[in-house]
Image (spheres, grey):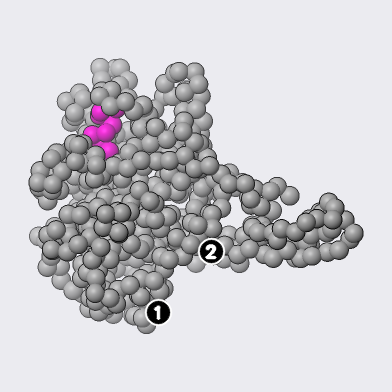
Amino acid sequence: MSGEDKFSSILKLTDLDYINPSQICIKPVEIEKTKPNGTSKIKIENDGSYVEVSEDGTEKTLEKATITLNDCLACSGCITSAESVLITAQSVQEFLTNINGTKTIVVTLSPQSRASLSNHFKLSPISVYKKLSTFFNQLGINYLFDSSFSRDFSLLESANEFVARYKKTIDLPLPMLASACPGWICYAEKTHGDYILPYISTTKSPQQIMGTLVKYYFSEKINKKPSDIYHVTIMPCYDKKLEASRNDFYSDIFNTKDVDCVLSTSEILDLFKDKEIDFNNLAETEIRDETFLNYDRANDKFIGVQGSSGGYLEFIYKYAAKELFNLDIQNKDIEYKVGRNSDFKETSLMVNGEKIFTFALAYGFRNIQNIVRKIKISTSTNKHCGYDFVEVMACPSGCINGGGQIKSEGGIKDNKAFTQDSENYYNDQLMRDPQNNLVVKEIYNSWLNGYFSQDSNTKLHTEYHRIEKSTNALNIKW
């Protein structure tokens, strides 16, 4: 849908996979409360406006409520007014206002955003990073980091959590559901209550782990208080704004959020426009500081993992096979069975002809609903749902096609090809398993006391909460 389209009077989750920016919600959110003389009715005019008709025939046009859906969730319902306030505070103008103070400014760039920018400008990912360094230096930004670095922690913690669940050394059930997608998390919290939340991995997303590292590890290295750092992330997803605003990621002790502001990839183009920047003609600043940056200087390449949504399935599959059964599995050895659509895949580990465990990949809400339904049935019947781990992402095609990514101007068909091109740019990197990252290993040894330790559980894990739906005009079915 384009930015000028209107929602229908009833919008169902099954009608879409995510909501594009700048929609207008035509449902009245707030109706002035007056003592009625009798029963009132509501009618919808041809222009889509709502009119209240009192018992005596008096008509009153109801005010249309406008919601900034450029930051809306792909969840069970519209954002609340409180959530709207939180995400409105995370904008290009808010970013520009806050970088002009005395704080140390840290920007973290996601590899999916980097790939989207590469595709848009037809530049290599390393050139995009170096030109962004030049641009941010001009704005007074102190550090530009890479969230694939923090993703190594997320993958390692998730893998060790799965092994602990499989061995039943922690009291959490299988299947374990990936937790890196905030749209999926919010949908689960608002829609499926307590019964689905124990299945979700407690590991923080790469964004929030980077927030922890920046505010509580890196701050010590540069002799700063956490509150003296302003941390901004560039993400492929609008939902990341709400994730950053969760109370779980706010420190009362230091009076600071782990991530202060989130900008989507497309908002970076707005930032260039605001500053009248010709990005292609910017000089490239050479990389001097490799702190929190998965970068191979010898090859002048970034280092990452296979899978443009973070590679959770592949890495946890290989890690668990090694830890549990001493089997060395390579990515090429993982054979997938594709479901009814390309956004659902499954694979099983076979040992001596016996199926040991089954992993699945479920992208988009239609596939997510099927997984949730299977888990609900298995819970009620006390039977295994058939899966041991599921990589869950709200957007079809995953994070590379996030709602905050740069889109093709040619419509849905062209955008599919554009997304594939972005994925090709994403794959322009060297591959390395996270346990081979020496800097990550050093931080685990010196600051976290090992994988899935008490310290890592405190710093790199979180909790989820059932959110009750409020009863308001948004829930009225006309």
Q: SS at mark 2?
A: loop
Percent position of residue 471, x then y: 62, 46
Q: Residues within 10 Å of mark 1 (few under 14, many from 20)?
A: few
In front here: 365 or 475? 475
In front here: 449 or 279? 449
Q: Which residue is mark 2?
A: 68
Question: Which residue is rendered at x = 58% and y = 60% of the image?
Answer: 1
Relative to 264, 150 lies left or right: left
In front here: 224 or 94? 224
* Bounds of the magenta segment: 158-166
Relative to 336, 60 lies left or right: right
Question: Which residue is rendered at x = 28% and y = 76% of the image?
Answer: 101
Q: Height in image: 207 above or below 349?
A: below
Relative to 341, 1 lies left or right: right
Q: Main secondary structure of the magenta part?
A: helix
Q: Is residue 94 magenta?
A: no
Q: Height in image: 153 above or below 386?
A: below
Give the number of the disc on residue 274.
1
| Among numbered discs 1 and 2, the one appearing first in the sequence | 2
Percent position of residue 235, x then y: 36, 59
